[in-house]
Amino acid sequence: MAEEVECTEVLEKIRKIIEEHMLGATSIHHIVEVQGSPGIVVDEGLAKATPCKCYPIPTPEKPEQMLCFSRGIIGGLTDAQEKLYCPSKVIVEEGISKRVAKFREAVKVCKAEIEKYPKGERLTPWLECMGREAKKRSIEL
């Protein structure tokens, strides 16, 4: 029962964030992008008390780049959030680096493809393109 109450409290925090930013029907995994990519803190105590899981996702510009997540926060952390919420880091060398590289390839293709559409009419072509390009790269969405 305690877990149910805790879950309800977290969902209420998320609902308030959505309302505050007038995101309406935006799906939860897009909220982070809409807000400029900081993670959304839903349980600060948990976030500060638990180690972060970080995944290497190197780019040509930043070969040491990591993507970190913390329990108590929805989405990836900014550098400032890492300093605040990562008492320690667990580096995970799983296949996520390859998955992110493939996903970036798909994004690059789709960004170019949707340029021909006027702003406000790009969502459906974007989703269709990402579905197609993810499938080509064996990325399960």
Image (cartoon, rainbow, N blue to C red):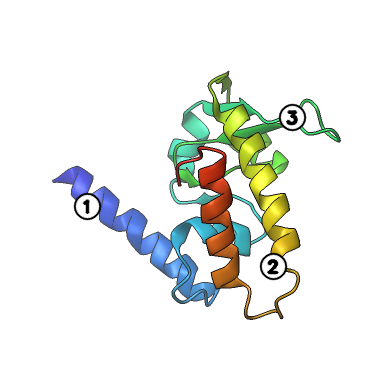
Q: Identify the residue under disc 2.
A: 114
Query: From this viewpoint, which residue is outermost toward the right?
Result: 61
Task: Kindly state the secondary structure of the residue where label 2 is placed.
Answer: helix
- Nearer to us of marks 3 and 1 is 3
**Separation (CA) of disc 3 from disc 1:** 39 Å
**Which residue matches tag 3?**
58
Earlier sequence position, callout 1 versus callout 2: 1
Q: Is residue 122 left or right of residue 94?
A: right
Q: Position of residue 67 (x, y in %)?
A: 63, 35
Rendered residue at 74%/29% (across/down)? 58
Quick one: 126 or 70, which is closer to the camera? 126
Residue 128 visible (yes or no): yes
Q: Secondary structure at mark 1?
A: helix
At label 1, counting other C-alpha atoms closer than 10 Å, the crowd grade (few under 14, some 14-19, many 20 or more) is few
> The residue under label 1 is which amino acid type?
Val
26 or 52, which is in the foreground? 26
Circle number at residue 5: 1
